[in-house]
Amino acid sequence: MANRKQSKALVRKHIFPVRLSDIELDMIRVKSQDAGMSASELMRRNALMRPLPKRLSKISLQTYWELGQIGNNLNQLVKATNTALKVGRTLPADPELLRELLELLHQCRRYIASDDVDDEDSEEEDEEDDWEAD
């Protein structure tokens, strides 16, 4: 696979040394790991004022997955209900109720996917950092 050509202005060839205490270095490592990116990318985004991507908590991800599984089961039940309706058999469930429930599940999954993960981060943003120049 051939390397993609990049504009010379976009190639990262400069190193910008920064002195950090052990605590600051650990904090950067933790924040970069929480954001799911390298420390270099975290520093570039913060320094260049680019927005950081939203991250979901493990509970939100697990809930999202579980709702997806429930949705799959509902889809199967809706299909069985529609099939029973067509062939004149007893319905296993009310089709309209199943559709409403399925839509509610989809709304929950969309809400979870769009929700911010760390309320703690928003609290930290309110506090002024002690390293900033006056």
Image (spheres, rainbow, N blue to C red):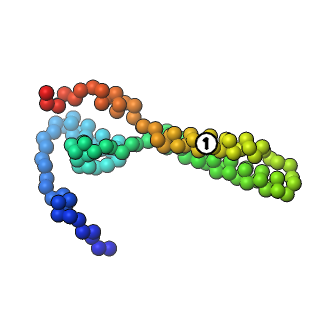
Identify the residue at horizontal 42%, vertical 37% (top origin): 116
- Residue 91 at what x, y percent from top left? 82, 48
Instruction: Kindly state the secondary structure of the residue where label 1 is placed.
Output: helix
What is the total number of numbered labels drawn onto the structure image?
Answer: 1
Of the 4 image quadrants, the one containing the N terminus is: bottom left
Left/right placement of residue 59 relative to residue 105 reads: left
- Residue 118 at what x, y percent from top left? 39, 34
Of the 4 image quadrants, the one containing the C terminus is: top left
- Residue 109 at what x, y percent from top left? 55, 43
Which residue bears the numbered disc 1? 105
Identify the residue at horizontal 77%, vertical 51% (top origin): 81
Identify the residue at horizontal 73%, vertical 50% (top origin): 77
Q: Amino acid at mark 1?
A: Leu
Res 35 quadrant in image? top left
- Residue 53 at what x, y percent from top left? 36, 45
Res 97 quadrant in image? top right
